[in-house]
Structure formats: structure tokens, C-alpha cells
Amino acid sequence: MLTRRTPDEVTLEIKDPVDPTALSQAKSILSELRPSDSPVVCPSALLSVARRLGDLPEGNDDYIVSSEKCKEAFDGLKEEDRKSLLNIYGRVKAFAEAQRKSVVDVEVDIPGGKAGHSVSPCRAAGCYAPGGRYPLPSSVLMTVVTARSAGCPHVVLASPRPAPITLAAAHVAGADIVLGIGGAQAIGCMAYGISGSDDGVRPPVPPCDVIVGPGNKWVTAAKSLVNGHCGIDMLAGPSEVLVIADGTANAEIVAADLIAQAEHDVVARAILVSDDAGVIDEVNRQVERQVGCLPEPNRSTAMEALKQSFSILCKDMEECIAMSDKLAPEHLEIQTADAEEVGRKCANYGGLFIGTHAAEVLGDYGAGPNHTLPTGGTGRYTGGLSVFNFLRIRTWMRIDREEEAQDMVEDSVRMARLEGLEGHARAAEARSLRVEPAYRKSS
């Protein structure tokens, strides 16, 4: 079922994740939300868009889901479901907090004073969790918990037609405001904020400094449009997994992992890379057997995705690693006899899963590291969602002893004139104890 390709046939296809039609539609929606160039989203305009696009039924004005309703959803879960949510919350929080502790304020000596950087969270974070075919409470935890662990004082969550499990996850994660809307309209609300209702029933929603989380093509398009007005994590494309397997790999498990990725979406990609033709053959047999056992609509989705998935037979493990680095997959699984060694040689990926037991689905559901990862080869230059998306590292400097800074002043004057920036040179000369500033000589 996996199309066979040779290493020479494989190229990194860098595709624009923004669909042109969705971009045009998202632009229109964002304009509609803010009539007369309002700086914030108008509630009446939002209600009109949300009803037309199916977020809210006619007559329902509650685009904000109350914290009481979120708690009710949590309390209404089975005990084992509540336990799993809390377990995942704890692991994601522990990892995110460890990340936060890894970056600290810095102070160093400079001539005549001090310089450094400070680390602080953004004021408000916006988190998107897809609704769509399946509710994704895991995305609620991955985004909201990470923003909270970074120290953001305000966290807004948006999810269309949120299922009870999604609202329960919002309660556990600690979202301040939950918007029951999706698509481009949700991104617009988080980017620009929403004014409060005149009767005071609905509170204002603050504009968010950063918006994160995966979504459909309208979400991606809207994120591309608001990027710059606020920060975003990434423009995510179709999900993907690449498994490097040798002759020791368990073909049944490899097949299960490939299918798990394929059921995400009809445009998802599952890739097998091996130096053993027998493993590729057996994995193919297992994929065909296992995919037929999936319920609908999972089976149809996975089978469609498998049409664009493929396997690569390499001459040795070094070529397997080179193929993986070339594709820079979102998820990279290593199922080889020396998985740790192979994993350390791989350079480009979103998330790395080392060994048979480190299933990618364990990463999806809260082993600790975030599951919002770069797709489409972007793992060559960026990483997945983390507390760092919500942190600002800002530099500062201070001169306490001007006489000790004079060499630095002279260097700045000279460099400014080499660059042709006379005003810069004169601003530096104004701090000189050795020369008279040029602006005094010319006046």
C-alpha cells in the first residue's frame, strides 16, 4: 500500500501551507468582524459570522463558554477519563516548567557598566484547539498548559462547537476565557480582541500577543494574515510521520504507527525508510491487514492518506538517515537495533521518538514534550511549540562609569562614520570625554 520510491526519487517538496482560496475567504471574514475598521471585533458582527458558518445556532448569543460549564463538563466525565486528563496535564506541565527553568535572566560586565537580558512572558496568549472530525482535548492541554507554564497572565482558548471533553480539558488546563467558535473568526477574535457587550453580560476578550495551535486551512490562512499584528507559532501543513526501521523492527508495530498517522487526515503522510527490503514487504502486508480493521470514517481517511504515503529502500543506515534529514519530518520514529545511536545522528525533525516503545502516539497524548510540531520540512530551521513561544528575551545595558566606556565610545564613532551615519557618530561623540562633538564645531 506504500508506494515504493528510490532515494533518487525523493525530494523535499516545500509547499505553501496557505490555501489561496481559504486566504481570500479568511481575509473577508477578518474584515467583516471589524466593521468601519474598528480596532476590536464587534460582538454583533461576530455573532453574524458565527451563525452563518455554523459555530452557533440561531438565537444563541453565547460565544463565550462559562467556566462553570467547563467545570460541569469535567465533573460529568467518567472517573477514569478525569484521571487521564489530570495525568496528561501533570506530565505536560512538568516538561513545560522544566523548559521555563532552562532559560534565565543574564547579566555580564561591559566597559563601564553592565548588560544583560531579561526573560518575561507575553501578556495574553491565544490557543486554538480544532473541533472538526474529532475533538482534540490533547491540543487544549498542549497549548494552554504551555502558555500557563510560561507565565502568561491571560490565556484565551478557542474551539468550534466544543465537545464536553474539550471543555473539561479547558477546565483542567486553566484557560481564562473559552470561545466556542472556530476558523478564521476565532483567530480574528484572539488577534484583535472582542469588545464587551453593552449590558455587561459578556466580558471583553483581550487581544492576544501570541496565537498558537493547529487548525484547518481557514485557521492557517487567518494566522498568516494576523502574523505581525501578533505572533504565531507556525503555519502548519498536513501531519506526517517517518519511521526508520532495520531488520530488527517489529513490522506489526511499524504498520500500526504508520496507520495512526494516516488516519489524521486524507492529506497526511506516512513514510517508511529502511535498509531491509524484507521489512518493507512485511510492513506493507501489515498495513493492508490492519487498515482494513479500522472503523469508519477512520478507515477511509487512512486509506486515502496512504495513497500519497511511500517507502524508501536505502543501501545502508547512513542513507536512511540522509533521507530523513532531507525530508525533515514532523514526527521521526527510530525502530532499529541501535536506535539511540541512529537518533543522535539525525539532524532534522520536529519530534524524535527513539526505540520501539517510544510510540509517536505517546507524544500525541502527553508524555511531556509538546505535540504541536513543525511540518513540511520546516524542522530544518525551527522546533515545536514550547514555553519559548510565549517568552520575550529582551536585552538591556547600563553605563555607570563613563570614563571606563571611552574606548567603546571611540569604536562606535568610528564604525558609525564607516557606515556613513554621521548622526550616529555625533550621538556617540556626545558621550566622549576625549573629543569635542562635531555638532558643536559646526554650530
Image: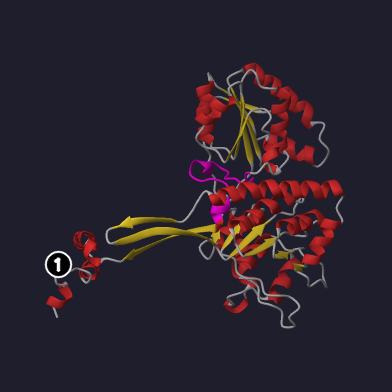
At label 1, the amino acid type is Arg
Residue 102 horizontal side relative to residue 370, left or right: left
Residue 265 shows in this picture: no
Query: Magenta span covers which residues?
Result: 369-389
Position above or below: 266 against 127: above
Which residue lies at the image location 73% right of the left edge and 37% below the top edge?
302
Position above or below: 414 against 341: below
- Which secondary structure lies at badge 1? loop
Residue 173 shows in this picture: yes
Q: How is the image coloured?
A: secondary structure
Which residue lies at the image location 83% right of the left edge and 38% below the top edge?
295
Quadrant location of residue 184? bottom right
Work out whether residue 245 or residue 93 is closer to the camera in this orientation and state it: 93
Image location (x, y in percent) of residue 438: 15, 72
Image location (x, y in percent) of residue 215: 66, 53
Does 373 lie within the magenta span?
yes
Return the residue found at the far front: 401
Image location (x, y in percent) of residue 394: 44, 60
Which residue is under mark 1? 434
Position above or below: 32 against 373: below
Is the C terminus in the top left, top right, bottom left or bottom right quadrant?
Answer: bottom left
Image location (x, y in percent) of residue 50: 73, 67
Residue 99 horizontal side relative to residue 305, left or right: left
Quadrant location of residue 143? bottom right
